[in-house]
Image (spheres, rainbow, N blue to C red):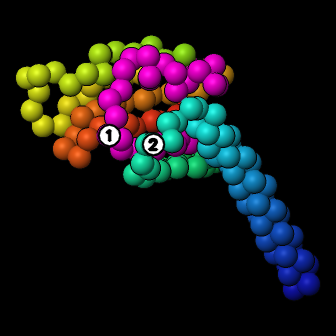
Amino acid sequence: MKKILGAILICIVVIALSAFFIVRSLEDRVTDEFVAQMSRLAIPGDWEPLDDIVRREQFLCMSMSTNPSIARRWQADTAMTVQDVKQIGAPADVIFSVEGTCQRPATATGPTTLCIGYATKDGYKYQLTVSSELAGLQMALSVRPS
């Protein structure tokens, strides 16, 4: 009887470990696809990276955040135009519709959102926000499932 229980326990452990590694492999594949979507865009070389937040695919999403997603922020000294925002998506055929002028209003004080580009392509939502901060321009790009 003890041998049968031991064999059953070993089978359960092997099945659980196999399931874990299969699910993890599938989750990693989805996360890698999000990173690939971001890398297809034409991010100017003079943008200084500030941070990356990658929320990987999880079989069970326990948090309230969008899962999976990727967000990156950059800082730049050069001004942006609506056309510049649209050109970032051009290599990937991602067409941004832009709200705002991307120019800082003369009456603005403190950090100000200058424009936001929205796009949807192949099941992904893209959002590029250009804001004026004390240290210059900051750009934040996020990619999420649509």
At numbered mark 2, what does the secondary structure look like: helix, strand or loop?
loop
Q: Which mark is residue 119?
A: none
Disc 2 crowd, CA 10 A, few/some/many (<14, 14-19, 20+): few
Residue at 30% x, 16% y is 100
Say which quadrant the N terminus sits in.
Answer: bottom right
The answer to whether 136 is drawn above or below residue 5 in the figure is above
Task: Evaluate if marks 2 and 1 touch, with contact meaning CB atoms under 8 Å apart.
Answer: yes
In the image, which residues are magenta? Answer: 65-94
Q: Nearer the viewer, residue 104 or 73?
A: 104
- Residue 64 in view here: no
Where is mark 1, residue-wise?
Answer: 77
Disc 1 crowd, CA 10 A, few/some/many (<14, 14-19, 20+): few
Where is mark 2, residue-wise?
Answer: 46
Residue 15 in the image: state x and y as whole percent. Answer: 82, 63
Residue 146 in the image: state x and y as whole percent. Answer: 55, 25
Q: Nearer the viewer, residue 103 or 98?
A: 103
